[in-house]
Image: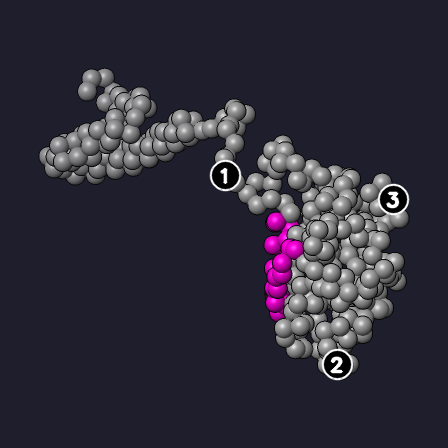
Amino acid sequence: MKGNPLKDIENAIGSCTSLVELEKMRVSLFGKKGYFAAQFEELKKLDGEAKKEFAQNLNINKENFLELLNQKKSALESVMIEEQMRKSSVDVTLFNQESAAGALHPVMDTMDKIIEYFVSMNFSIEEGPLVEDDFHNFEALNLPKYHPARDMQDTFYFKDSMLLRTHTSPVQIRTMLKQSAPIRMICPGAVFRRDFDITHTPMFHQVEGLVVDKTGKVSFANLKFILEDFLKYMFGDVKVRFRPSFFPFTEPSAEADISCIFCHGEGCRVCSHTGWLEVLGCGVVDPNVFKAVGYKDVSGYAFGLGVERFAMLLHQIPDLRSLFEGDLRLLEQFR
């Protein structure tokens, strides 16, 4: 090297543009035939103070160049990493084709969540036919022929007096007829009524529950506990209240409300400015129902809820009919 060799080496290290060049520079300095190997050979020829001074300068230069090499290596590695990241980066503002993967319908997803809770509480799942007879759908549930409460049900009848079930309660009757107490069950499924507006469709889904045991073992307090826990599982930290109501198959009967999940009880359009949302009906099973299935010395409670109602509340869907129209603009939001 001509001129100042140390300065030339320093400049050569600084001018390296890749790790490969830098490695070649390191070998030329510290390899067996490199610059410092030659300098140590020169050291052997010296004596006394000259040798001592030469050795000190040689060690200082060696340390300085090692430091320069390490600094340059770190700088080149940083540049290389940044370049790799730049090449592999994705512009998130660019159009990206949506996944074609499917998903559960919001009604089925809500039903699965409801079933999951009650199964965890040791309820069995029972099923029954969609086409029912008058006895299982009405009479056994304390709704005898010409009972005024039948006007509440707009029913699809067949010519042979069979009908599409208007609730899943007939499954409870069938279960009690085929087995004895204790019973702890839910019956999810589709039901049918002649109704079609913003909050009703001709076909919808219900989940009804029934618990039966010996007299005195089941009370309204048990019913309140299980439903309060269930509603908080579904809707989070909400308040729950029970209002007296009437159902032919339970006595006493009640409707359960939760504090509005939209306005948190302050009052809004959804809850009609009451701060409460009606979510399900319940009560202690009427003795006439037990009489119809031949049960004696038993007590029990029952409850029922509309799955679509829960889905609308959980996902803030304003029109029940939109759940059955197959509109992809709505359904794709649940993937």
Sooner in the amino-acid sequence: mark 1 or mark 2: 1
Query: From the viewer's perspective, is the residue at label 1 or at label 2 nearer?
Result: 2
Name the element at disc 1.
loop
Looking at the picture, which amino acid does disc 2 mark? Lys
Label 1 packing within 10 angstroms: few (<14), some (14-19), many (20+): few
Question: Which portion, as a residue range, is magenta?
Answer: 108-131
Real-space Cα distance between discs 3 and 2? 44 Å
The circle on residue 101 is: 1
Query: From the viewer's perspective, is the residue at label 3 or at label 2 nearer?
Result: 2
Residue extending furthest front? Answer: 160
At 43% from the left and 26% from the top, the residue drawn is 86
The circle on residue 296 is: 2
Q: Nearer the viewer, residue 159 or 16?
A: 159
Looking at the picture, which amino acid does disc 1 mark? Ala
Rendered position, 149 above or below 202: below
Are the residues at dot 3 and dot 2 in contact (C-beta closer than 8 Å)? no
Pointer 3 residue: 272
